[in-house]
Image (cartoon, coloured by chain):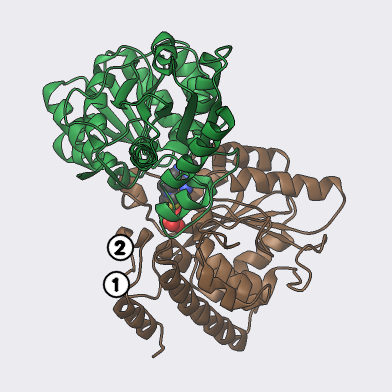
Chain colours: A brown, B green
């Protein structure tokens, strides 16, 4: 067993807290990309609390694993994860998105500790991750690059150009995730621009591909441990998720791609998440 | 004074245009409720093409549609419409001088919440630099209405940028726009202000403040940034003590650079109230950012005073 029941219980509790804090920061900010921050939260939690080789007290440690949030609009969730992991005081997030704050909607790696790559425009994270992976290989270093893509983001041709390059260069030190929540802004991915057969596309592009439930910690652990051990080329984990996961009125509603939260909506969200 | 939202006026005008002209087709990249092409889509679903988050592809498809005699309107946030699709716009659209209209929504700092990645401070510069391209920046909702019609009537590539937020009316409801021609909004005799976009109404505010100090200011709306009637611009500055240029855009490659070039050799003092070659950032309001970057009537007043003091 790659992961114990107790570990799973602990990770779920961390994720629950991360989701609640993401709700709070969204409230303070006056609005944020909450739906996609919640859908990827279990993946971020298991990565940051179990698998990433990192040291929050030394964010620039050269040997650290790199994490690239290619779907940079999820920054509100990533900022909470980094705070709760100890990169900085969570209280600083009260200023999220204020003029002059280090924390903008899309996190800036020059301003926020623990952010390896600045993102926000879709379709840049995967090419940059291929570059990171090739750089590590050139330098003979054994850290890994993890990258999180949105499914809508995969409409961008640059993702597939990078997919080709990663397979061509057999980047065995690159592990990709797609937060496959089946939603983008204008609606479901399959009605806006069909992606299916999605996992087969990654396979056809030469990626060792796994399709899992992105909220199931056993499946996540199995897929991640497989990917860590697989060195022949890049691995893509297509993680089926629910946009707005954990908050009843947000789940699977594309209207909650971005939103502001009234006191009442915050109360309801927290109660859905088992608090208050 | 009324307020209008340029995006809404654009969406409504596009829909109306669509009902009069079968050739109008609309392309969208997963932002239809923001760019407001959702209105066109509802009315003419068969002429609205959603391409997903693929702006470069969208520009290429538009070029193909133009080659079949259609009049495409391509839509995204300005930074993606102009930036992400730059090479497609240059190679597939402008070299062929194809009839494609590109609309950059949420331009300047107006997408205040999303920060540097989403704020187009250089869209005018990069679009102006491409041969064959026409570049437009409407001052208010009324001008958007007229511009959209002019874009459809114009044969060749056009880029128009739009503000995200409600903006005060700066111009009369009709006869506000003639492509290529700078228009005097408020006349004066001491100082001339060249402006585009939301800075036009701010320039009028500054002019009202300066009037109380006995400084008479002419405000000119330069809503066509290319091709610009350079002789007209020169004419409008003749006899003035100084020129103030203001724009919600980088000082690189926008109206500031354009005016400095056109007015070269005239011996006229020229100052600019614009964004000083830096990226934007996230904020809780557009106004907060405009203050932060000094894009205010107060800054124009200070700049004007300093210029006149030096000149005196
Ligand atoms: C190049 C580019 N085009 C458009 C946008 C605007 N935008 C931000 S998020 C988003 C939708 C993202 O959908 P998806 O990747 O599925 O993310 P998720 O559903 O996980 O939030 C869009 C179109 C952008 N950030 N970058």
Q: Are marks 1 and 2 in contact (CB under 8 Å)?
A: yes
Residue at label 1?
A: A249
Instruction: Identify the image quadrant of residue A114.
Output: bottom right
Q: Looking at this rendering, what residue extends furthest in the right direction? A: A140
Q: Secondary structure at mark 1?
A: loop
Whether label 2 lies within 8 Å of ligand 1 gets the answer no
How would you rate the neighbour count of disc 2 (Cα within 10 Å): few for under 14, some for 14-19, many for 20 or more?
some
**Which chain is indicated by disc 1?**
A
> How many numbered callouts?
2
> Can you give x and y, in whole percent of width and height, for residue B292 in the image?
52, 52
Residue drawn where x is 47% and y is 30% of the image: B245
Image x and y of residue A35, in percent: 40, 64
Counting other residues with Cα less than 10 Å from the Cα at mark 1, is it few (<14), some (14-19), or many (20 or more)? some
Per the rendering, the mark at residue A253 is 2
In this picture, residue A206 sits left or right of residue A186:
right
SS at circle 2: loop
Q: Nearer the viewer, residue B218 or B295?
A: B218
With A131 as the anchor, is B11 left or right in this view? left
Q: Nearer the viewer, residue B65 or B180?
A: B180
Badge number at residue A180: none
B122 relative to A167 in the view: left or right: left
**Relative to A51, does residue B8 appear above or below in the rendering?**
above
Q: Work out whether residue B33 can be spotted.
A: yes
A229 vs B200, nearest the viewer = B200
Q: CA distance from mark 1 to mark 2?
A: 8 Å
Determine whether the beta carbon of the residue marked 1 sits less than 8 angstroms from the nearest atom of ligand 1: no
Q: Chain of mark 2?
A: A
Please provide percent x and percent y for residue A102: 60, 62
């Amino acid at each position: 067993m790659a992961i114990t029941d107790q570990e799973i219980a602990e990770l779920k509790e961390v994720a629950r807290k991360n989701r609640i804090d993401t709700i709070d920061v969204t409230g303070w900010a006056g609005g944020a990309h909450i739906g996609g921050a919640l859908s990827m939260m279990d993946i971020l939690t298991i990565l940051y609390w179990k698998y990433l080789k990192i040291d929050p007290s030394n964010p620039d440690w050269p040997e650290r694993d790199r994490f690239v949030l290619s779907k940079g609009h999820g920054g509100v969730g990533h900022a909470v994860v980094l705070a709760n992991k100890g990169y900085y005081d969570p209280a600083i997030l009260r200023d999220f998105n204020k003029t002059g704050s280090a924390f903008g909607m899309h996190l800036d790696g020059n301003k926020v500790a623990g952010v390896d790559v600045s993102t926000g425009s879709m379709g840049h994270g995967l090419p940059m991750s291929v570059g990171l992976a090739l750089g590590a290989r050139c330098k003979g270093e054994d850290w890994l690059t993890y990258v999180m893509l949105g499914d809508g983001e995969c409409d961008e041709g640059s993702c597939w150009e990078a997919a080709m390059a990663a397979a061509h260069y057999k980047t065995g030190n690159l592990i990709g995730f797609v937060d496959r929540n089946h939603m983008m802004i204008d609606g479901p991915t399959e009605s806006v621009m069909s992606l299916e057969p999605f996992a087969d596309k990654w396979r056809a592009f030469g990626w060792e591909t796994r399709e899992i439930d992105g909220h199931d910690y056993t499946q996540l652990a199995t897929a991640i441990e497989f990917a860590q051990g697989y060195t022949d080329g890049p691995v893509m984990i297509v993680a089926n998720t629910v946009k707005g996961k954990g908050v009843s009125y947000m789940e699977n509603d594309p209207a909650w791609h971005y939103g502001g939260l009234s006191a009442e909506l915050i109360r309801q969200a927290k109660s859905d998440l088992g608090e208050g | 004074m009324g307020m209008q939202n340029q995006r809404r006026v654009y969406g409504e005008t596009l829909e109306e245009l669509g009902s009069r002209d079968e050739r109008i087709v609309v392309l969208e990249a997963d932002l239809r409720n923001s760019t407001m092409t959702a209105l066109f889509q509802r009315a003419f679903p068969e002429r609205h093409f959603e391409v997903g988050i693929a702006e470069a592809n969208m520009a290429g498809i538009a070029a193909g549609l133009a080659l079949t005699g259609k009049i495409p309107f391509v839509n995204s946030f300005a930074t993606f419409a102009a930036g992400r699709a730059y090479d497609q716009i240059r190679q597939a659209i402008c070299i062929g001088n194809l009839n494609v209209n590109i609309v950059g929504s949420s331009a300047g700092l107006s997408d205040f919440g999303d920060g540097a990645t989403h704020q187009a401070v250089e869209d005018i510069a990069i679009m102006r630099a491409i041969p064959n391209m026409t570049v437009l920046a409407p001052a208010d909702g009324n001008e958007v209405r007229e511009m959209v019609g002019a874009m459809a009537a114009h044969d060749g590539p056009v880029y128009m940028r739009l503000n995200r937020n409600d903006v005060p009316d700066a111009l009369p409801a009709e006869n506000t726009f003639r492509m290529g021609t700078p228009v005097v909004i408020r006349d004066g005799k001491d100082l001339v202000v060249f402006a585009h976009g939301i800075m036009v109404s701010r320039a009028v505010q500054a002019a009202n403040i300066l009037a109380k100090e006995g400084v008479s200011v002419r405000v000119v709306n330069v809503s066509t940034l290319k091709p610009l009637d350079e002789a007209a611009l020169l004419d409008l500055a003749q006899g003035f003590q100084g020129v103030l240029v203001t724009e919600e855009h980088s000082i690189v490659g926008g109206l500031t650079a354009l005016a400095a070039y056109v007015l070269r050799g005239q011996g006229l003092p020229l100052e600019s109230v614009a964004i000083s070659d830096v990226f934007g950032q996230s904020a809780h309001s557009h106004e907060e950012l405009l203050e932060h970057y000094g894009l205010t009537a107060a800054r124009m007043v200070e700049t004007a005073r300093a210029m006149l003091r030096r000149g005196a």
